[in-house]
Image (tube, rainbow, N blue to C red):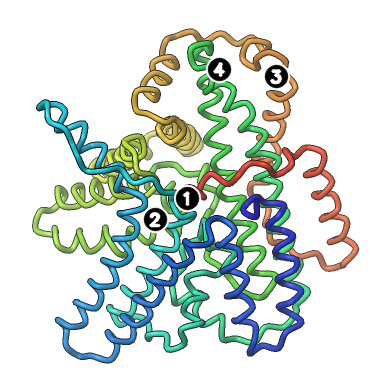
Amino acid sequence: MLFNSIPFLYFFIITTTLFFTLPHKLRWILLLIASCVFYMFFKPEYILILAFTIFIDFYAGILMENTDNKKKKRNYLIMSLIANIGILAVFKYYNFINGNITGFVNLFHYQNHIPYLKMLLPIGLSFHTFQAMSYTIEVYRGNYKAERHLGIYALYVMFYPQLVAGPIERPQNILYQFRIKKYFNYDNAVAGLNLMMYGLFKKVVIADRLAVYVNKVYANVDGANSTTLLIAMIFFAIQIYCDFSGYTDIARGAAKFMGYDLLINFKRPFESKNITEFWRKWHISLSTWFNDYLFTPMVINFRELGMFGVSLALFITFFLSGLWHGAGWTFIIYGIMHGIALIYEVLTKKIRKKVAKKVPGWIYNNVSIVLTFLYVSFSWVFFRVETVGKAFHVIKKIFSGNFTFKLAQISGQDGTLTFLLCIALIFFLFVSYKLPVDMKFKKPFSTVVYLTAVTFLILILGCNGTGEFIYFQF
């Protein structure tokens, strides 16, 4: 399937070759066609959903800019938001809401006769929906001029490298870039290839290798002891980071090769000393979206409530952030856990500063990093399992006290090599954590050697690129 990493590379090679062959005035057409083809590999008819929202948002932007009437401008924005959120609500949340209604009325011995809908969730729907909404909100606020070229605007929403899993772009960052004439540039090409290969390595080698262990453990929770589940919990945290940041690197690298700069979505999040810092470094394009368009406006509206208003805004924001990740109570609990942690950090900021002054800096910082990592990893238990009941079952097993550490036991039958390889890959990840992955070599020979070495490692250690990216489901 095209959404797997290896076929994506073939698609990228063909598209990029044509890109630098065609004259500048035809390149937006090529990229738009390529993006449509890319998306239609999933479910061709769903391209109509994108077309619908693109037309609505494009003309809503122009109408907002053409009027000085605040009420009309607001109505045009509301029309755009209803179209986008409506599509998202129907495809992603309809059955979830309907299921909860069924559960509720059953408590009173009533039946819910509202039918369920059998439909696939359009791939990456939450990503391009939020990207489209950022455009109309920015035009409404007067921060960006309405785009007058329908094809360029459609490309903003559909640009294939980041269409299905971000980063969630802002019009200020990417829209103008589609008008700039691009030339083949050696530095951009090398930086882009380095990003793509490092991202591919993180996905195919590290994330997919860790997935082998994690999947086996979660498939047999009853047969796992506390140590095994704790290791699986930590492995999954690193798996999801390598999976998601790996895609981001591939997307940014593919765009960079052609001369386009996408937003940075990760800044070494596992070095965070608290949850506030974590969300400044993890999925940055989403966290800033919620901050700019939801949290900050709520804080302004709740300003008379003081710290309670800030806490309420944090809770609502992360409740919705959890819901953005998936239509299920496991995702909502995941979001609430982060919201509660952030509320705690806001309310205890002064106390924690006093404690930090009394403890040696290296101790305080390292303990904070470990505790933050463990809390984030713990919250991702709800991210990994299918039901709340199974999540609590996993948590209960982790805290059951059966912390034996026998390699053969924690690695599973015939899994010792897989386990040791996972440990080695994690060690490599954190050693390379601070390296500039878009580094440029001065000599072409050095570039060839580096890319050949990475390709060889991917072919030897990789899982053949068969696993889809986790965030595609959102």
Residue appearing at x 66%, y 88% in the figure: 24
Q: What element carries label 3?
A: loop
In this rendered view, identify the residue nearer to me: 117 or 243. Answer: 117
Distance between the alpha carbons at the discs numbered 2 and 3: 37 Å
Q: Are marks 1 and 2 in contact (CB under 8 Å)?
A: yes
User: Dots 1 and 3: beta carbons under 8 Å?
Assistant: no
Total labels drawn: 4
Mark 2 surroundings: few (<14), some (14-19) or many (≥20) residues within 10 A: some
Say which residue appears at 34% left-offset and 44% top-offset: 322
* 68 with respect to 56 (left or right): left
Estimate the spatial distance between the alpha carbons at disc 4 and disc 3, rounded to whole Å.
12 Å
The tag earlier along the polypeptide, 4 or 2, is 4
Three-letter amino acid code at the position of disc 4: Thr
Q: How crowded is mark 4: few (under 14 residues within 10 Å), some or many (20 or more)?
A: many
Q: How far apart are marks 1 and 3 (CA)?
A: 31 Å
Front label number (2 vs 3): 3
Q: Which of marks 1 and 4 is nearer the N terminus?
A: 4
Task: Find residue 282 and name its label.
Answer: 1
Q: In which quarter of the image is residue 141?
A: bottom left
* Mark 4 touches mark 3? (CB < 8 Å): no
Task: For residue 302, say whether it is visible.
Answer: yes
Q: Distance between the residues labelled 4 and 2?
A: 32 Å
Q: Mark 2 points at which residue?
A: 287
Distance between the alpha carbons at the discs numbered 1 and 2: 8 Å
Which label belongs to residue 415? 3
Give x and y (percent) for residue 325.
39, 47
* Position of residue 80 measured from the top left corner of the image (x, y, whole percent): 29, 72
259 left or right of 179 in image? right
User: What is the three-letter code of the residue carrying label 2?
Assistant: Ser
Q: Which amino acid does label 1 sit on?
A: Trp
Residue 16 or residue 34, whichever sits in front: 34
